[in-house]
Image (cartoon, rainbow, N blue to C red):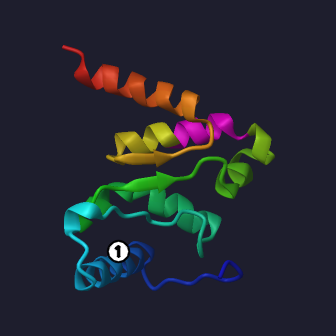
Amino acid sequence: MQDNPVYDDLLLDVMGFLRERQLACAQAGIARDKLLVDPGFGFAKTLAHNLSLFRQMELLHELGSPLLVGVSRKSMIGKVLERDVEDRLPGSLALAALAVAKGAHIIRAHDVAETVDVVRMIDAVRCAE
């Protein structure tokens, strides 16, 4: 899966796959409001794919389901920052903040307290008068 992932158009291919899964869920009787979408950062994607998909993430809102982003401690952070997994907290927090700014509804995180602080600060700024 990871050896040589190739896409005709990364964003369109990921969105097409997610639309197919939404349709399969609907056909199985699962209500649309019970679904969320996860673009699968780190799965069958190169570093360049992951960075490009993250950059274009807000376009995934066209799918009409809440967006889950799970990049905490991912190898993409390790590759960019040249950090071992135990030293990826700053990169994880940066991507969590960016994901929230791009409209992510759910952040999957290993370092929950720190990530909650990031999201709470973003929310405080957004709600300030």
Q: Nearer the viewer, residue 56 or 14?
A: 14
Which image quarter is the C terminus in? top left
The vertical placement of 60 against 22, above or below, is above
Which image quarter is the N terminus in? bottom right
Residue that protrudes farthest toward the right in the picture: 84
SS at circle 1: helix
Residue that protrudes farthest toward the front in the picture: 29
- The magenta segment: 88-95
* Main SS class of the magenta portion in the image: helix
> In the rendered image, which residue does mark 1 sit on?
15
Q: Nearer the viewer, residue 35 or 6?
A: 35
Rendering coords of residue 63 (x, y %) = 25, 67
Rendering coords of residue 76 (x, y %) = 65, 56
The vertical placement of 17 against 52, above or below, is below
Rendering coords of residue 51 (x, y %) = 54, 58
Residue at image location 24% in from the left, 21% down from the top: 127
Determine which quarter of the picture holds residue 9.
Answer: bottom left
Residue at image location 46% in from the left, 37% down from the top: 97
* 17 sits to left or right of 5: left
